[in-house]
Image (tube, helix red, strand yellow):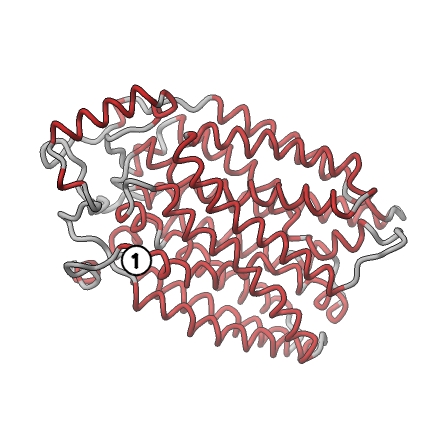
Amino acid sequence: MPARSGVVAPPGWSRWLVPPAALSIHLAIGQAYAWSVFKPPLESSLGLSGTASALPFQVAIVMLGLSAAFGGTLVERNGPRWAMSVSAVCFSSGFLVAALGAATRQYWLVVAGYGLIGGIGLGIGYISPVSTLIKWFPDRPGMATGIAIMGFGGGALIASPWSSAMLSHFGTDPSGIARTFLVMGAAYAVFMTLGVLLVRVPPDDWRPPGADRATGADRAAEAGQAAAAAPSRALVTSARVSARNALRTPQFWCLWVVLCANVTAGIGILEKAAPMITDFFADSSSPVGPAAAAGFVGVLSLANMLGRIVWSSASDLTGRKNAYRLYLGAGALMYLVIAVVGSSSKPVFIACAGVVLSFYGGGFATVPAYLKDLFGTYQVGAIHGRLLTAWSTAGILGPLIVNSVADAGKSAGRTGPGLYTTSFLVMIGLLAVGFAANELVRPVDPRHHEPAGDGGRPPAEAVPEKGAGL
């Protein structure tokens, strides 16, 4: 397979060069979380409702999940460089098509470009480094995936003020929006290419530093001591489960519900962030202007980004199940605080929203390691891709719940926090469902395991079977 062997790391290659390669992709595609900055200009210049202006974002998230699910096996087979190249082409060209749509006032082209084409780039780019990072960092999978995936959360930290500045410079009319899309597409194409050129996969016989100095007996003894000292590691397996078999396990579907609930709760705020904080305090003595609203998007992006590295790294110590207990349980509490007292204090509203978004990011960064714990590393990239269909579902549910409730409230003459209270209560219910699903996760039954190879040790670079699709 030349596509794979062409990017195998040479002797002496530092594994710490791989996270920056992944970051270059994720920081770019993380621009999706800054979409709310474009909502007010599109609504005013094209006469769209809040629900309609969310459509490109919703389609992008749906395509993210679908392309990740159907492309996961191809990513495993062809390697990260191929996947990152596909992502760069689709994501950057999506902006160019969206620019044409804005310039010609053809909104369907914005949806097709940013949502359909760009969404494919999102999905392939999102999963492209995950299995590679887990193979480079088998000793610290939560930290490794957290470093890379935090880039997706932090992408809006760059894109939000950058987009706002370009819209201020070029204008918020269709022509100005088109020019902004055009510049972003070209810039992201260059930036993502850096990751394509840098990424490498480990050789088949590669082991983490220090692993080769221990004998097999030493490693077995250390593993036994670690297992005895950490009962939460009961969910960690050294067996191999194929992507096809993973879909037949209740553990996969429990995690699907967990991820869907956590993402729906976070993405509902994130997609509507800029207009939400503006509406929430519109009737207060100090309303929120466009610049401050864009700053709020940046704060949420920072929380999203930090949550991905902090919470996922902590999950290496606490266990994945305990981590999700925190994300879902405390997340429901934060929503309750916002619904009850959030309108009385901007700091309380911003702090609680930030915590929710940190759990949202932490959930994304922790789930690859959770999958690795349950199913092993054999086809973890393909399994992860299939699990991201939960993100597609949440990408529809979250914005639909928040925007439809807010639009209905405006039609009824309501203003301020009343536009969102019902949405927050729905999110609390969804997080409770996710909490219950997480409690049902148990070790995978051995009947789903693949036969052990290479003396009982899973291969470092297992290639999926042909036809291992959905």
**Helix, strand or loop under label 1:** helix
> Along the horizontal axis of the image, is 360 left or right of 229?
right
Q: Which residue appears at 11% of the width and 31% of the height?
A: 216
Residue 98 position (above or below residue 23): below
Tell me where residue 275 appears, x and y as whole percent.
Answer: 74, 56
- Specify whether 75 is left or right of 298: left
Q: Which residue is mark 1?
A: 80
Counting from the top left corner in percent of width and height, residue 31 is at 54, 62
Q: Residue at x 24, y 57 (%)?
A: 14
Q: How many marks?
A: 1
Point 50% across, 42% down: residue = 362
Residue 149 at x, y = what percent?
Answer: 44, 51
Q: Tell me where residue 140 appears, x and y as whole percent.
A: 33, 41
Toward the viewer: 262 or 59? Answer: 262
Residue located 43% across and 30% down the image: 318
Viewer-proximal residue among 313 and 405: 313
**Which image quarter is the C terminus in?**
top left
Amino acid type at image mark 1: Pro
Task: Give residue 371's quadrant in the image.
Answer: top left
Q: Is residue 386 left or right of residue 300?
A: left
